[in-house]
Image (cartoon, rainbow, N blue to C red):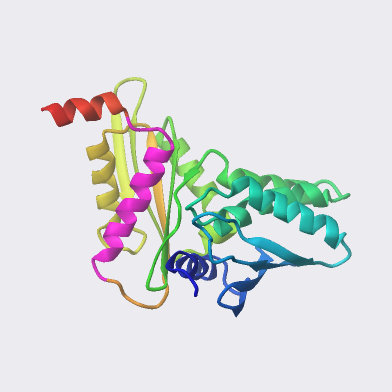
Amino acid sequence: MVSDDLRDELDAIEAIYPECLVRMNDNLIDLKIPQHEEFIARISFPESYPQTDPPHILQVRSNGHDDQYLETLFNEVLDSIFVEGNVCIFDFCTELEGILYIEEEPETSGNVDEVEEVHIDSLEGWTISDPITDRGSTFIGFVRKVESEHEANEKLALLKMDKKVSKANHNMVAYRIQNSDNTRVQDYDDDGETAAGGRLLHLLTVMDVWNVIVVVSRWFGGTHIGPDRFKHINKSASESIVKAGLVDDSKRSKKKRK
């Protein structure tokens, strides 16, 4: 019997990477590696996943590569990122995107190298939350430190160059910046998700974080989920902020004592 965790995980993968996943049965999939669709991994999920055991790579198919080597490589990547109790296929895809660029090592230089560098830099420096999936919609939070409004806009533009982020229906944004001259600037963008940006800015204010930009991407699954979307947006953002270590625990404890 397929677990709710696995079902939600596969729904999220389908939302973020359309046409990359084929479900063979409840516990077996064929996965085209995003941005390297010539590599197809057949993955099985034991009943104990994700509680105690990782998925297994049964086979890797590719065009003109050493499939046995790739099978070993893919299993090593899975083993290295799997943590008991946590789903891992999204992290597996993200990890492989970078590894396969290095493994392929294109012989040509110039424009090809530049494209590769842009892709790698798109997510560099961002802390990313785990995906949340509800009725087909998927939410992921991204956060990073910035020192100026110009840098915030620059990093945001670069993030939106990432293939999966660019396909999101909404990329909601908020930032708060305290400049070296003690002037402060803060702003937000709903990106079509009414009131979402303002709520993100309120979250940054409540968490008392400065020099931070937070982005929550939503891939819409076709079913409206009402106010629950704000709960998921807030959770994705706060999880990424805490995960990045941007919250001053001493300030939070003082507020609680008051």
Q: Is residue 173 above or below residue 33?
A: above
Task: Let me know if residue 242 appears in the view.
Answer: yes
Image side of residue 140 versus residue 70, left or right: left
Residue nearest the viewer, comparing 224 with 119: 224
Quadrant in which the C terminus is drawn: top left
Task: Tell me what residue is drawn at x 46 percent, y 69 percent.
Answer: 3
Task: Let me know if residue 183 appears in the view.
Answer: no
Q: Magenta stretch: residue 162 in it? A: no
Please provide percent x and percent y for residue 208.
26, 33
Residue nearest the viewer, comparing 125 with 2: 2
Q: What is the chief secondary structure element of the magenta stretch? A: helix
Q: Magenta stretch: residue 231 in it? A: yes
Residue nearest the viewer, comparing 143 with 47: 47
Please provide percent x and percent y for residue 2.
49, 73
Q: Is residue 179 above or below residue 14?
A: above
> Toward which corner of the image does residue 232 lie, by quadrant?
bottom left
Stretch in magenta: 226-247
Task: Tell me what residue is drawn at x 73 percent, y 46 percent.
Answer: 114
Task: Tell me what residue is drawn at x 57 percent, y 72 percent.
Answer: 18
Image side of residue 240 versus residue 79, left or right: left
Q: Is residue 82 above or below residue 232?
A: above
Image side of residue 78 versus residue 252, left or right: right
Residue nearest the viewer, comparing 126 with 184: 126
